[in-house]
């Protein structure tokens, strides 16, 4: 494992102030570059969106035409119980989708399921209440797997800048 090279600290208050100013310049340059990048991405997206949209519509129409013909000729296309037909330039296939379940009024549905003894269809999610532990850290001090980090100090550098209104 390689070790990080030792950094030299700033030598005086003037150097600290100028390094903070340099960090501010770097952060502003990052913002400028990110903005320029996003502007270019928006232009590229706009340029190609107008070309892509009609192609997507065409694919949808062509797919519908193919599906209509294939549904009418399904018995010929699918032999020996297969679900896929090879059509030389591509293939078509039919797959049974898994059931989809929609629940309206989840609280009422849960109450009904429990009333009829169908608890196996109700999922109970248990989580550790970190907020409560933060208020009573001594109560869980001996519980394996819980570590309460206290007194952690964060060092933050905030270069000053003027916001244009």
Image (cartoon, rainbow, N blue to C red):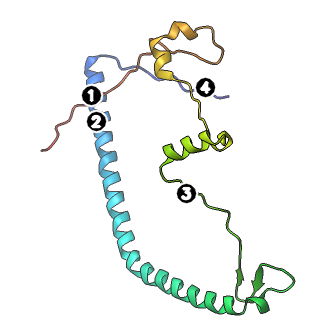
> Which is nearer the eye, 126 or 3?
126
4 or 1: tag closer to the N-terminus: 4
Q: Residue at coordinates 25% horizontally, 21% vertically from top-left?
A: 14
Secondary structure at badge 2 equals helix
**Displayed quadrant of residue 120:** top right
Q: Distance between the residues labelled 4 and 3?
A: 55 Å
Give 143 or 81, whichever is nearer the viewer.
81
**Separation (CA) of disc 2 from disc 1:** 10 Å
Q: How far apart are marks 4 and 1 (CA)?
A: 28 Å
3 vs 1, front mark: 3
Looking at the image, is 46 positioned above or below residue 79? above
Disc 4 to disc 2, C-alpha distance: 28 Å
Instruction: Indicate the position of residue 148 as horizontal and vertical percent values.
Output: 53, 15
Q: Name the residue under label 3.
A: 102
Mark 4 vs 3: CB contact within 8 A: no
Quadrant in which the N terminus appears: top right
Q: How far apart are marks 3 and 1 (CA)?
A: 60 Å
* Residue at x 65%, y 62% (from the top left corner): 99
Q: Is residue 53 left or right of residue 139?
A: left
For disc 1, the neighbor class at 10 Å (few under 14, some 14 to 19, many from 20) is few
Q: Mark 4 points at which residue?
A: 3
The mark closer to the camera, 2 or 1, is: 2
Residue bearing the label numbered 1: 18
Q: What element carries label 3?
A: loop
Write down the residue under mark 2.
24
Residue at the left extreme?
165
Mark closer to the chain start, 3 or 1: 1
Q: In this view, does 76 lie above or below 9?
A: below
Mark 3 closeness class: few <14, some 14–19, many ≥20 residues within 10 Å: few
How many C-alpha atoms fall within 10 Å of the one at disc 2: few (<14), some, or many (≥20)? some
């Amino acid at each position: 494992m390689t070790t990080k090279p030792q950094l030299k600290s700033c030598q005086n208050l003037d150097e600290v102030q100028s390094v903070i100013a340099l960090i501010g310049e770097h952060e502003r340059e990052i913002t400028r570059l990110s903005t320029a990048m996003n502007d270019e991405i928006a232009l590229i997206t706009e340029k190609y969106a107008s070309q892509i949209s009609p192609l997507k519509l065409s694919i949808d129409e062509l797919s519908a035409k193919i599906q209509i013909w294939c549904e009418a000729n399904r018995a010929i296309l699918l032999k020996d119980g297969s679900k896929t037909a090879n059509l030389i330039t591509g293939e078509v296939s039919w797959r049974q989708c898994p059931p989809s379940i929609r629940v309206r009024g989840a609280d009422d549905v849960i109450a009904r399921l429990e009333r009829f003894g169908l608890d196996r269809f109700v999922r109970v999610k248990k989580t550790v209440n970190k907020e409560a532990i933060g208020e009573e850290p001594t109560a869980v001090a001996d519980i394996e797997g819980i570590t309460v980090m206290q007194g952690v100090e964060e060092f933050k550098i905030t270069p000053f800048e003027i916001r244009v209104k």
